[in-house]
Amino acid sequence: MEDRDVAGLQAYADELRDTFMRMQREASDLSARAQTIRITEKSADGLVSATVSVRGELIRLDLDPRVFRRPDARGLADMITDTVRRAAAKAIEELVELFEPVVPPEQLRAHLNGDLETVLDQLSSGMSGEGRRR
């Protein structure tokens, strides 16, 4: 192994250690703050309002009584689904922003999306001395 490779690995190990130590110090505060994330999103026409947690769990659903003037169950279901999905996406983005000081956004997004290939590629890049994109 060349000195450059060893130096790159050492630098990456140092960065991981520093990140881990910082995460450990900030973990309880960040975790508590993450658990309080609630996002409310409205449909385009304002007739549906959905509030979700950081996990995308539906906390509250409000329907304006005017939705019943249009007897379109499929349309209403689609509107609710779309509104909940947009709220969940915003909750994820808020979580990513919250953890940005300790976890690179693209790495956290990949992890939250279950994109193991991207997570492993990022770890491999760091270990090979290529560094991580921030």
Image: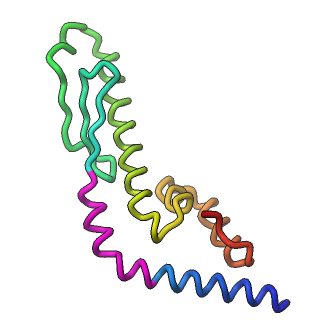
Q: Is residue 52 left or right of residue 17?
A: left
Residue 15 highlighted magenta (yes or no): no
Q: Is residue 56 left or right of residue 109?
A: left
Name above or below for residue 17 compared with residue 111: below
Q: Residue 52, image x and y in percent?
A: 27, 44
Residue numbers of the magenta segment: 21-37
Name above or below for residue 11 compared with residue 61: below
Residue 65 sits in which quadrant?
top left
Q: What residue is at 65 percent from the left and 64 percent from the top?
A: 133
Image quarter where the C terminus lies is bottom right
Q: What residue is at 36 percent from the left and 82 percent from the top?
A: 25
Residue 67 sits in which quadrant?
top left
Image quarter where the N terminus lies is bottom right
Q: Residue 37, image x and y in percent?
A: 28, 54
Q: What residue is at 74 percent from the left and 72 percent from the top?
A: 130
- Looking at this view, is 99 or 51 the one in front? 99
Q: Is residue 28 left or right of residue 17?
A: left
Residue 32 highlighted magenta (yes or no): yes
Considering the whole magenta stretch, tell me its main secondary structure. Answer: helix
- Looking at this view, is 80 or 89 the one in front? 89
Q: Is residue 48 left or right of residue 25?
A: left
Q: What residue is at 69 percent from the left and 72 percent from the top?
A: 131
Q: Residue furthest right?
A: 2
Q: Residue 121, image x and y in percent?
A: 67, 65
Name above or below for residue 100 compared with residue 81: below
Name above or below for residue 100 compared with residue 64: below
Q: Residue 82, image x and y in percent?
A: 38, 29
